[in-house]
Amino acid sequence: MAAFVNSKTANKNDQPTGGMGFFECIDDKQAAFFLFDTCKNWLKEKGMEAMDGPINFGERDSWWGLLVEGFTPIPYKMNYNPPYYKSFFEEYGFKVYFNQLCYSLDPQKRVQDKIYARHAEVSANPDYRYDHLHKNNMDKYAEDFRIVYNKAWVKHGGGKELEPKQVKQFFKSMKTVVDGTAISYVYYKNEPVACWINIPDINQIFKFFNGKLGILEKLRFMWYLKTGKIKKLIGIVFGVVPEHHGKGVDSFMIVEAANRIQKEKRYFDFEIQWVEILIQK
């Protein structure tokens, strides 16, 4: 396991709070408590009065949280742990700070009729149009995502604006594995007003490599990627800018994306992650 102090968040709630994570332990309470004590004592030495965990060093989209139900194969960068971990944390004194929920569905099935109805209303307005990411113009779609993100999230939950360089690096990092047809945008008079970022679940490939990622595994990875080995999509970001809330833009984007995904018949499972999702109501 690991213990750490994030200077940006350690004093956010008027109580110096450190973090612990990457916890792995056999089914032995004494061993687990020894690890917890080691982290707690180290954090005390750093002036911390509370311990948050299991968490990651940075953002909540990777290696964050304790799995307590739904022990199914997990997507890439999500924590998996045996069921007995729950009792370790509870008996040691950890309390639930917030619950994180993930939802899944079959993307080949028809969505609710009311979503199609709202889609039809937006489709009748020529000022709105749908598009998906094209890999030959990554910088353009990275900037469009940044615009939507900064308008939709920056004032929500203490978020901060994303910088162009930061977003370009993120899009560049996922270029190899991303499926452009699974990343959706909505434009109003050619200005981006909504986006939906979905990525293939590359754990469906990594599970064959037994923790290794040498040259042979990398070649196999690219082969599996090109031959459609991945049948599952992971939803990581969905947002509509405030000015277009309540206008059916979310439904418009969902149906347009569904039509494309269902036509290709490549993905048969879809999991929306627990990271914050902003939609109109």
Image (tube, rainbow, N blue to C red):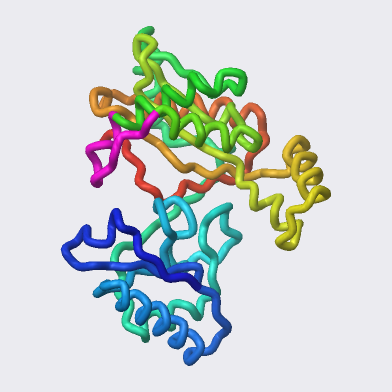
**Based on the displayed image, in which of its 4 quarters is residue 263 positioned?**
top right
State the residue lying farthest toward the bottom.
Answer: 30
In reply to whether residue 156 is colored magenta, the answer given is yes
On the image, which quarter does residue 237 sit in?
Answer: top left
Q: Is residue 265 positioned above or below 123 on the image?
A: below
- Identify the residue at image location x=34%, y=74%: 43
Residue 207 in the image: above or below residue 42:
above
Can you say whether 86 is above or below 181 in the image?
Answer: below
Residues rendered magenta in the picture: 151-163
Residue 72, given in percent of the width and then of the height, sits at 57, 62
Snapshot quadrant of residue 149: top left
Give coordinates of residue 239: x percent, y percent.
36, 34
Can residue 253 be seen by looking at this rendering? Answer: yes
Q: x%, y% of residue 210?
A: 74, 62
Name the residue at 29% across, 32% down: 152
Q: Nearer the viewer, residue 129 or 25?
A: 25
- In the rendered structure, the answer to whether residue 159 lies left or right of residue 71 reads left
Q: Is residue 264 magenta?
A: no
Question: Foreground: 87 or 264?
Answer: 87
